[in-house]
Image (cartoon, rainbow, N blue to C red):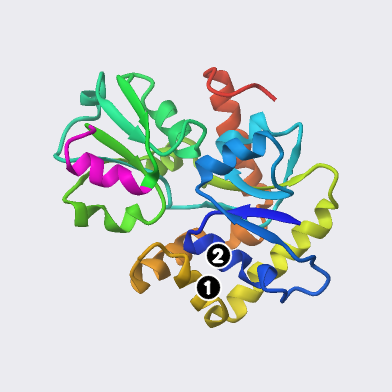
Amino acid sequence: MKLAFSPCPNDTFVFHAWVHGLIPGAPDVDVTFADVDVTNTAALAGEFDVVKVSYAALPWLRDKYRLLTAGGALGHGCGPLVLTRDHRDPADLAGATVAVPGERTTAYLLFRLWSQGFAPGDIKVVPFDQIMPGVAAGRFDAGLVIHEARFTYRDHGLTMLADLGEWWEAETGHPIPLGAILAKRELDHEAVTGWIRASVEHAWRDPSASAEYVAAHAQEMSPEVTRQHIELYVNEFTADLGAAGHAAIDTLLTRAAAAGLVPAE
């Protein structure tokens, strides 16, 4: 089975047990590690059986995939950040050059919803690990960051202009939908969900079992940042989206469709 997810600590933590044959009944997997902007595009061609994508990409993928209720990233206090080199007013972004991690990322969708009153100028799609250095060097006026950048942006001498997660939660009362796990429509979705949920539960029972695997793919993160990353992005919604998770997703995509930013369901 072809499985694709990011090398970020939350994903390697979640999928470690399945990848390493520790889940009874789960098939062997051929793993591809890729940033979410890459998987968003690859999923359009149906390249993977099970794949981690942005919730913002879901409207373009429903013909080939179904959303699973386990393994994804959704939560509180975990949203993308808008960073600049100095303090400024959000309205100053009108006409500015902003680096974003992908056109169909949830981060960029949240940014577009948030910034509707002061449309930025030039949007540059940049690999997420190059955004903070680019803002610090003055190549971009602002950067939209995700993942562990929440914990490390001060190390680059940057200032947080806005926390789009805080904005979203205050605006809607819902948790923040970030990364979705999809499976091809022809698969047994109940079985795949069960394997992923079992992998999550295995990781929680024995966090040390995945430590070497997580560290090997953590892109030179410190152990402390790795720990914070997992604690923030692997939570109760990772085991089961539940009613609150589904409501958050529906709200995001309904608002985005009403604004003409994604196709209507």
The prevailing secondary structure element of the residues shown in magenta is helix
Q: Secondary structure at mark 2?
A: helix
Amino acid type of the residue that numbered disc 1 sits on in the rendered structure: Tyr
Q: Nearer the viewer, residue 175 or 214?
A: 214
Residue located farthest toward the left when viewing the structure as drawn: 86
Q: Nearer the viewer, residue 61 or 44?
A: 44
26 versus 22 height, above or below: above
Question: What percent of the width, then of the height, locates residue 168?
Answer: 44, 38
Looking at the rendered structure, which numbered label has been put on residue 12? 2
Q: Secondary structure at mark 1?
A: helix
Residues at circles 1 and 2 in contact by the CB criterion of under 8 Å: yes
Residue at 44% across, 27% down: 113
Residue at 59% across, 75% down: 204
Residue at 44% across, 33% down: 108
Amino acid type of the residue that numbered disc 2 sits on in the rendered structure: Thr
Residue 174 visible? The answer is no
Neighbours of disc 1 within 10 Å: few (<14), some (14-19), many (20+): some
Question: What percent of the width, then of the height, locates residue 2?
Answer: 72, 54
- The image quadrant that residue 127 belongs to is top left
State the CA–CA distance, disc 1 to disc 2.
Answer: 7 Å
Looking at the rendered structure, which numbered label has been put on residue 213? 1
Question: What percent of the width, then of the height, locates residue 56?
Answer: 56, 35
